[in-house]
Image: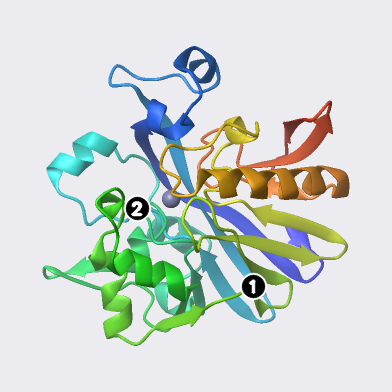
Amino acid sequence: MKFGDLEFHIIGDGTFRLDGGAMFGVIPKPMWERVAPADERNRILMAMHSLLIRAGGKCILVETGAGDKWDAKPRDIYDFEGARLPEELAARGVHPEDVDIVVNTHLHFDHCGWNTQGVEGRALPAFPKARYVVQAGELEHARHATERDQASYLPDNFEPIASANQWDLIDRNTEIAPGVELLRMPGHTRDMMCVKLSGGGQTAIFLADLVPTAAHLGTPWIMGFDLYPMTTLENKKKLLPEMARSGWLALFAHDPKIPAARLHEAGGKITAEPVKVD
Ligand SMILES: [Zn+2]
């Protein structure tokens, strides 16, 4: 898809499964299972989308999926399947050394797995020439996660980037290339980011885990994982009506069927009209 001089593609690192109850927080199962059917272990299917962006002469990758540094037990729990990000990049002619900037909206394992790859038992940066961008507060939190959320943070996804001195830590909204703006969007974690793409009179927002799937557009449909759910609520009420009014494209990190949609608001309810993006 092209927005003026900015070009982006939605690619991905396949799918995985998370507990449906955890994914929908306070929403009762009879409501969520109509839009996200659970398997026999109560898990729902989730995609892991990345954005491949070309803007201002830079090749930018937003999110790096779950990667492949997994043992049998978590593989069984999360059921990783399907496409692999390195092959998805190669299919678009992008080699690891071509990537200039890697953006992690936050450092949960399903957003930064291919930051690194296993080489002879060690995790090393997968994009050797890239600067990796995250909020300083998110890296700080990842290193000191609490008992409640430490299972979401795997040091092999972020410490090798620090050892190789490839982190660019930011602490506010930042435009990293023409039309590519990182927006601090607390709620899911204190320092998560969304990504705003604009050019040629068009705008899209990659919603990361603020609204992981189209099923999460309803205001109280907030993940149980969120550390600050009331902040998620406020940010959804601010951002989603604005996106609907302005005709901005919504890009979903985890929706297995609807990677992109236009939003509509009627009677205080936000709905998604799927849009095809290559
Ligand atoms: Zn997350």
- The image quadrant that residue 120 belongs to is bottom left
6 is higher (above) or lower (below) than 108: below
Left or right: 108 in relation to 239 = left
Left or right: 160 in relation to 58 = left
Give the numbered dot on residue 66: 2
> Is the C-beta separation of discs 2 and 1 under 8 Å?
no
Q: Secondary structure at mark 1?
A: loop
Question: Identity of the amino acid at label 1?
Answer: Asn
Q: Is residue 130 visible?
A: no
Residue under numbered circle 1: 173
126 is higher (above) or lower (below) than 9: below
As drawn, the residue found furthest toward the bottom would be 165
239 is higher (above) or lower (below) than 124: above
Whichever of labels 2 and 1 marks the residue nearer the N terminus, that label is 2
Question: Where residue 166 sits: x, y (%)?
Answer: 39, 84
Frontmost residue, 227 versus 199 = 227
Question: Where residue 230 sits: x, y (%)?
Answer: 56, 44
- The image quadrant that residue 273 belongs to is top right
Question: Where residue 47 sits: x, y (%)?
Answer: 46, 41
Question: Identity of the amino acid at label 2?
Answer: Ala
